[in-house]
Image (cartoon, rainbow, N blue to C red):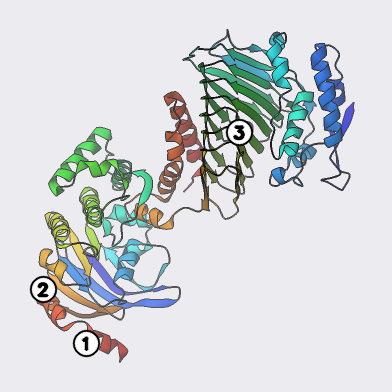
Amino acid sequence: MSAVIKLSNRYRPETSALALAGWEAFIADTTAPSWVQALRKRSGEKVRMMGLPTPKLERFKYTNIPAYLKMNSLAFSRVDMTIGGHKDYASDLLMSFDQDFVQEMLEVAPAGEGKYGDLMLWDFANSLIANGVVIDVPQNTMMDMPINIGYEGEGGHAYAPRQIIRVGNKAQVTIIEHHTGGGAYWHNGVTQIHIAKGAKVIHYRLQESSHESLHTQNTHVEIEQGGTYETFTLTLGAKTSRNQIHVDLLGSNAEVFVNGINLLKNKQLGDATITVEHKAPHCVSKQNYRNVVAGQAVGVFQGKVHVHQIAQKTDGYQFAKSLLLSPLATMNTKPELEIYADDVKCSHGTTSGQMDADALFYMRARGISQSDSERLLIEAFIAEVIEEISNDDMKERVALCVNDWLSKQVVA
Amino acid sequence: MIEIKNLSAEIDGNEILKGLSLSIGDGEVHAIMGPNGAGKSTLSYVLSGRDGYEVTGGTAELDGENILEMEPDERAAAGVFLAFQYPVEIPGVQMTTFLKTAINSVRKARGEAELDALGFLKLMKKTCKELGISEDMMKRAVNVGFSGGEKKRNEVLQMAMLEPKFAVLDETDSGLDIDALKIVADGVNALRAKNRSFLVITHYQRLLDYIKPDYVHVLAGGKIVKSGGPELALELEEKGYAEFSKNEAA
């Protein structure tokens, strides 16, 4: 049995369609709890109507998701997940369905500009809702041990795991998500995080998905007064990936730090799309990204800071540097500042360039081989962002991943 | 010893060196002086193997091996050292990482045992002390935020640690005040040894007050046009390079 998901004619005049086996049957499954069935049905209707995002949409200009799906036939299922750290707080979503807030949060979707394109993947994830993790950290709770969530993608499947993380007033938690897998699959994850007053979430994502896979990750964060969200993503895997982070600063004096390193090679495409909505005064947002693009890979960085009129005294900063290692590598960078308040401090900067020939020669003149020189320069290029990782274990882990990538990449 | 024979080189099709010959014995210090545009910096880059400089003729042999056929890092391992006129800043690469990688690359290529972290630190501290260089400099990124004098002292430090057989000093005096110049010259003098040759490239005689050469050559129009003892430098200081520029024009 197969279903046809139409792509919106508005954005794609040609009547191109995707055949996704078993999708209709999946959303019509009557064994799931009734509210899950209702959510799948509602979302399924939206997906039928709107389709999936295509490059005709500004927000998806560089990242072609339908193209991947046309090349791969996928069945829908649950993803294998492992949860470590604090079993008390982490459980299968299916076991947590009776908690009211889960339902409440599932329906929350990011607001703001560009939401139309962004919500297509969200709706699609809702139509596929099957399993996930709920972490509810009570107020004033400091969780010292990070919570680890692992995903093991399986070839031939499409799935949409959901993480719901709600952190009470002045509570603190560290979450580590790790993606691995084999073969061609589509991971369309949604992570929803609510940070209450004075609470803090440190969130790491290591994306080492199969190099044949499609990885789309939608993260939505709401931060109340005095709350802090600190996130770092390392992108190494997937054939095509889009890591989309949407942050709503809802209360004053909240802070958000969105950092990442994308190491891309061969014919990979890696897209980091970040939106920060300053909806309250006296908030701080900082984005700091490094892209290293080798082979025929394509990197995408779209960072947006939207300062609403009420958000006076905003301190917004956005920085993305890209290093192209080959003449066939591509980097698309689109920084955006949209400011409606008149007393703010916002800055942004992006650079794309190749390896510094003078520095390379200087090192080689000191006896360091071409490959070692390149390696040192790439390490130096990303060092600042690694340095900003606050968890020492994670810092070390990322450094090891980077080393491993470099030793395979830089060949004399 | 170093034996340069009939060396010709061009950049972007422009011939800069036109049959330069020079022989430097072990332990000797030779100075090359010349007007701007004579090919002084080109010579240093050709000898160290920088991209973009095409050798169109001749040889440069270090102890019988033609270094012109080697990669820049192979030349360094063979014992060639270039002290840069403008040392390059490398943000994010720590001095210690840089030095340790360089020394171990060279030691490995020379068939010597690589230094472990402790062995390297000992050597670095010892060399810093001998040259009067603050160890704080080693905690910074390569040449980043270094003063002109610090950059040149850093070149001398690298030279001391890499133990070359043949060191080329490209306008080491440029950008230095007299005190910094003395310190750098003292460092170079300390490294003079009977198995180490130097080629000191300079526009001004001043540097040669502090690094005393055995021989002085005048480079003009892409070749050596006059050679002599240290007194030649004084003569040039007095008369300038007009004589040689005229020759070139004629």
- Residue A21 showing in the rendered view: no
What residue does disc 3 label?
Answer: A279
Mark 3: few, some, or many residues within 10 Å (few <14, many ≥20)? many
Q: Callout 3: residue from which chain?
A: A
Above or below, B162 relative to B17: above
Residues at marks 2 and 1 touching, judged by CB atoms closer than 8 Å = no
Discs 2 and 3 lie in a common subunit? no
Discs 2 and 1 lie in a common subunit? yes
**Which numbered disc flags the more N-terminal residue, 2 or 1?**
2
Marks 2/3: CA distance? 75 Å
Above or below, B40 relative to A384: below
Identify the residue shown where x is 29% and y is 60%: B84
Provide residue A291's location: percent of width, then percent of height: 54, 43
Q: Nearer the viewer, mark 2 or mark 1?
A: 1
Q: Nearer the viewer, mark 1 or mark 3?
A: 3
Q: Callout 1: residue from which chain?
A: B
Above or below, B116 relative to A99: below
The disc label shown at residue B243, or none: 1
The disc label shown at residue B119, or none: none
Position of A165 with respect to A70 (left or right) is left
Marks 2/1: CA distance? 18 Å
What residue does disc 2 label?
Answer: B230
Give the residue type at disc 2. Answer: Pro
Give the residue type at disc 1. Answer: Glu
Mark 2: few, some, or many residues within 10 Å (few <14, many ≥20)? some
Name the foreground residue: A93 vs A313: A313
